[in-house]
Amino acid sequence: MTEKVGVLGKKSSRRTGVERVVNAPLPTVYGAFQAVGYLDHDRGDEQVALVYGDIGADGVLTRLHSECLTGDAFGSQHCECGDQLASALRAVVAEGAGVVVYLRGHEGRGIGLLGKLRAMALQAEGLDTVEANLALGFPVDARDYGVAAGILQDLGVRSVRLMSNNPRKREALVRHGIQVAEQVPLLIPPCENNITYLRTKRERLDHHLPHLDAVAHLS
């Protein structure tokens, strides 16, 4: 809890950080999870962690999944997000324990839904995903993972086996006090509609995507 001085000189309090609000059972097609709901007081976002089994504190199989309405809900083939989310949920169930932190406010690498759609329109005209963001005046990647670290700390997690191809997620967690014991690849077979996007992620955003070498025939 922090205090701020208002415009009339009166002290006003404003909560900061992440607060656990609710814990509810969530049966899914993948397995029976606990949905732990949080409020990010700094950004105003509502967040959720899907927890499966007795996760313990160390080496917890974990996915930090950035919100992607088009991929997660609509099955877009512009990206691999929906398949990655499903694969991560299946993986923690197969493991017997794990966490998927679903990060709202991360749409389009943090530029919002409309910003992402505008960037996709530019990509259809020939720009890559990095060029499109910059052409619209957005950062290449505006995501922050501090809230994810706060959620993991609240869950008692000290170290993770991170399901991600993105080295920046690992660096961000370590910076925020969560150790990464292992980075576990989450590789989804590409298709004709997302191969250019995935190659850009590998070549310009340093994502570890070695499986793309086997699909050179896709244009």
Image: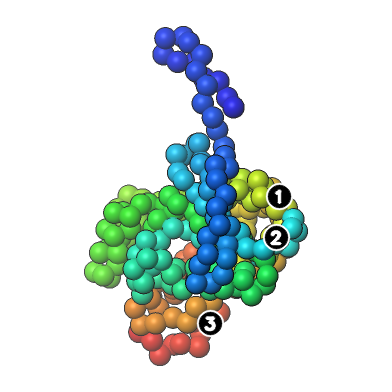
Q: Regarding mark 3 in the picture, which secondary structure is present there?
A: helix
Quarter holding the N terminus is top right
Which residue of the protein is positioned furthest toward the bottom in this rendering?
A: 217
Q: Badge 1 local density, few (<14 within 10 Å), some, or many (20+)? A: few
Closer to viewer: mark 1 or mark 3: 1
The disc label shown at residue 55, or none: 2
Q: Regarding mark 2 in the picture, which secondary structure is present there?
A: loop
Marks 1/3: CA–CA distance: 34 Å
Mark 2 touching mark 1, by CB under 8 A? yes
Please determine whether, in this image, residue 97 is positioned above or below residue 195: above
Quarter holding the C terminus is bottom left
Q: Badge 3 local density, few (<14 within 10 Å), some, or many (20+)? A: few
Three-letter code, disc 3 = His
Please determine whether, in this image, residue 129 is positioned above or below residue 199: above
Q: State which quadrant residue 167 falls in.
A: bottom right
Which residue is found at the position 61% from the left and 45% from the top? 150
**Quick check: 108 left or right of 214?**
left
Precedes in sequence: disc 3 or disc 2: 2
Q: Regarding mark 1 in the picture, which secondary structure is present there?
A: loop
Three-letter code, disc 1 = Gly
Which residue is found at the position 41% from the left and 13% from the top? 7
* Residue, disc 1: 156
How far across and how far down the image is residue 121, in percent?
Answer: 25, 64
Which colour scheme appears in the figure?
Answer: rainbow
How far across and how far down the image is residue 41, in percent?
Answer: 50, 36
The disc label shown at residue 21, or none: none
Marks 2/1: CA–CA distance: 9 Å
Closer to viewer: mark 3 or mark 2: 2
Which one is nearer the viewer's eye here, 190 or 64?
A: 64
* Residue, disc 3: 211
- Is residue 215 something one can see in this rendering? yes
Which one is nearer the viewer's eye here, 90 or 193?
A: 90
